[in-house]
Image (cartoon, rainbow, N blue to C red):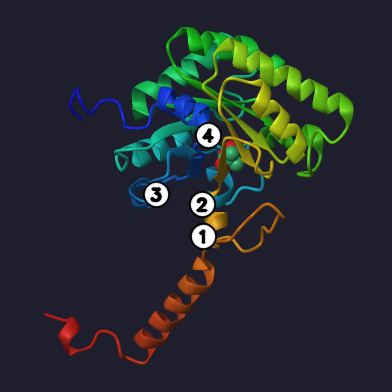
Amino acid sequence: MSVAGAVRAVTTLRLSEMKQRGEKIAMLTSYDYSTAKIVDAAGVDVILVGDSAANVMAGYETTLPITLDMMIYHARSVVRAVNRALVVVDLPFGTYQGNSKVALDSAVRIMKETEADAVKIEGGEEILESVQRILSAGIPVMGHLGLTPQSIHKFGTYNVRAKEEAEAEKLLHDAHLLDEAGCFGLVLEKIPAALAERVTREVKMPTIGIGAGSGVDGQVLVIHDMLGITNDFSPRFLRRYADLNGIMSDAVSRYVGDVKSRDFPNEKEQY
Ligand code: KIV
């Protein structure tokens, strides 16, 4: 990449301007080169190399097992494909909690080894020191509050978070802390729409919702879910834009049939 092209067209500053003028931000996950190329060319503003790769790419039940090395592999593949979108990479479980020096080392590895633009971290006050230390190194940080899947063993379910007043108050408090620390954005996952709207009104940084209603500054979905590759996950917030599971299953069965019946390859498909 040339020096002039070293910064992608969508920057953290541009996201903040989008919030100010009320332009919605479209964010989607990607984990590989070919998908990221399509997503970028289609005009998505932010590509998240999410630790949901643990689920949809590696088949784990939770996001906890994915390692920093695995995230770096996915992020490198995505970055090679992207010209326009801002690329954000999740810091995986165990690489930032409890020790801000470890958090900084993890974020530095992501930035150096992948050439992504920013990192995302789950949590509020508990991980504030890590957020501040990463930010102090000039690395943009996106927060993530509400349903934070890395804490699934603490919550015990993937149900809607912050329905009770005490949890909603804590979420608001955490959002303000992340905003004041200088995060450039905040994912709000599976919380009541009214609470997400209030956070969005009260913080400077753009908010990106997933199951958080329409009063946020942007939306994010996991690409395998919105394309219908996964069909065993149907939360209320998910809109499916395609049935790739059906399309792929049909194509693969037709291929199997053609091979078995000797229809493939035909005379034109050989040398
Ligand atoms: O890992 C991920 O895909 C995420 C989104 C659900 C926001 O964090």
Q: Looking at the image, tell me whether mark 3 or mark 4 is earlier in sequence order.
A: 4
Q: Looking at the image, tell me whether mark 3 or mark 1 is earlier in sequence order.
A: 3
Foreground residue among 70 and 84: 84
| Residue marked by disc 3 | 39
| Residue marked by disc 2 | 223
Q: Looking at the image, tell me whether mark 1 or mark 4 is earlier in sequence order.
A: 4
Q: Is residue 226 above or below residue 175?
A: below
Q: Residues within 10 Å of mark 2 (few under 14, many from 20)?
A: many
Helix, strand or loop under label 2 = helix
Q: Is residue 239 above or below residue 17?
A: below
Left or right placement of residue 7 versus residue 21 in this view: left
* Image quarter in which the C terminus is found: bottom left
> What is the three-letter code of the residue carrying label 2?
Ile
> What is the three-letter code of the residue carrying label 4?
Gly
Residue 104 image point, x, y percent: 50, 13
Q: Are marks 2 and 1 in contact (CB under 8 Å)?
A: yes
Nearer the camera: disc 1 or disc 4: 4
Foreground residue among 207 and 249: 207
Residue 124 image point, x, y percent: 69, 20
Q: Residue at x 55, y 48 (%)?
A: 222
Q: Residues within 10 Å of mark 1 (few under 14, many from 20)?
A: some
Measure the C-alpha gap from mark 3 to mark 1.
12 Å
Q: Residue at x 41, y 87 (%)?
A: 257
Nearer the camera: disc 2 or disc 4: 4
Q: Residue at x 68, y 59 (%)?
A: 234
From this viewpoint, is residue 5 visible?
A: yes
Q: Are marks 3 and 2 in contact (CB under 8 Å)?
A: yes
Measure the C-alpha gap from mark 3 to mark 4.
22 Å
| Residue marked by disc 1 | 227
Measure the C-alpha gap from mark 2 to mark 1.
6 Å
* Image quarter in which the N terminus is found: top left
| Residue marked by disc 4 | 22
